[in-house]
Amino acid sequence: MNLAYVCAQIIFESLPISSSTHTALLGLTTSLAVDFVAHGPTVLVLAAYFWRDIVWWFRSWRSYKMTLIAWLEASVVAECITAVLYLIFHWWHPHFPLTVGITISAFLLLSLWFVPHGQRSIPRLSDGVLLGLVQGMVIALPGVSRMAATYTAARWAGMAASHAFRFSCLLQVPLFAASALLGLFFLTPTEAASLFSWGSIASIWFSMLIALFFLAIVERLALQGGWWLFGIYLLGLETILFFVR
């Protein structure tokens, strides 16, 4: 079990730059089961980061029932479409170079410089369809950031930055939770013993704190219209990789 891979995965998942890209570039690998389990801490990070929103929804359920139902409906539609596309791509299994995914992520992020000033705070079913298609397509494109792709799609669909950010994060929770549970089922006894040792747990918790810090920066940049900076970073990374090769 590669603990460095798990910690890097947790940290990079909080940034719209593709965690799989950066773990690959760092030469970090691990088994598929451990890779799946590594998504579990991200669910806890998101729950900790949005705990105020979660509490508010529970307290305001009666007053804002229709709003919450609209969010749930759009999310369910998106996840169902994602699941269908996952099965299709799992069967078809197309291959794309990692650099293609990095380039796509970069231009998606740079496109936010031109996005109209969206005001909608409640997702529509059409948003769920759009983000489900986008999220499902990302599965087949290594190097494309799921967060960058879904956030950009939500912004171009007219959602306000803060709500597009929340919608993008919300869509990660069911996928990551299911992935973590599936990974736990397939962990070998050796991997489980290593993953749940005190040293590993301490490292994972420290990585989660870093992820929380980065997530706060990412949200602030989203509200300030600064995600194009991540696009510049990815183009720089792509340039470096071009000359290194």
Image (tube, rainbow, N blue to C red):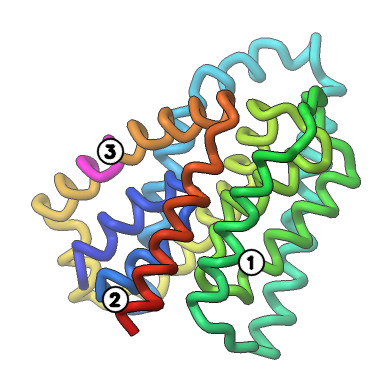
Please report the bounds of the magenta region as a residue range: 205-209
Work out how far the residue at label 1 is from the one at label 2, CA to CA, in angstroms: 21 Å
Mark 2 vs 3: CB contact within 8 A: no
The correct choice, above or below, for 58 with respect to 126 in the image is: above
Q: Residue at x 46, y 58 (%)?
A: 234
Q: Residue 208 colored magenta?
A: yes
Residue 30 position within the rendered picture, expressed as x and y whole percent measured from the top left: 29, 76
Residue ID for mark 1: 138
**Residue type at the position of mark 3:** Ile
**Residue type at the position of mark 2:** Thr
Neighbour class for label 2 at 10 Å: few (<14), some, many (≥20)?
A: few
Residue 154 position within the rendered picture, expressed as x and y whole percent measured from the top left: 74, 42
Magenta segment main secondary structure = helix
Quarter of the image with the N terminus in it: bottom left
- In the image, is 84 to the left or to the right of 31? right
Residue 239 position within the rendered picture, expressed as x and y whole percent measured from the top left: 41, 68
- Upstream in sequence: badge 2 or badge 3: 2
Residue ID for mark 3: 210
The residue furthest left is: 199
Q: In the structure shown, which secondary structural element does the residue marked by tag 2 occupy?
A: loop
Work out how far the residue at label 2 is from the one at label 3, CA to CA, in angstroms: 21 Å
The correct choice, above or below, for 66 with respect to 37 in the image is: above
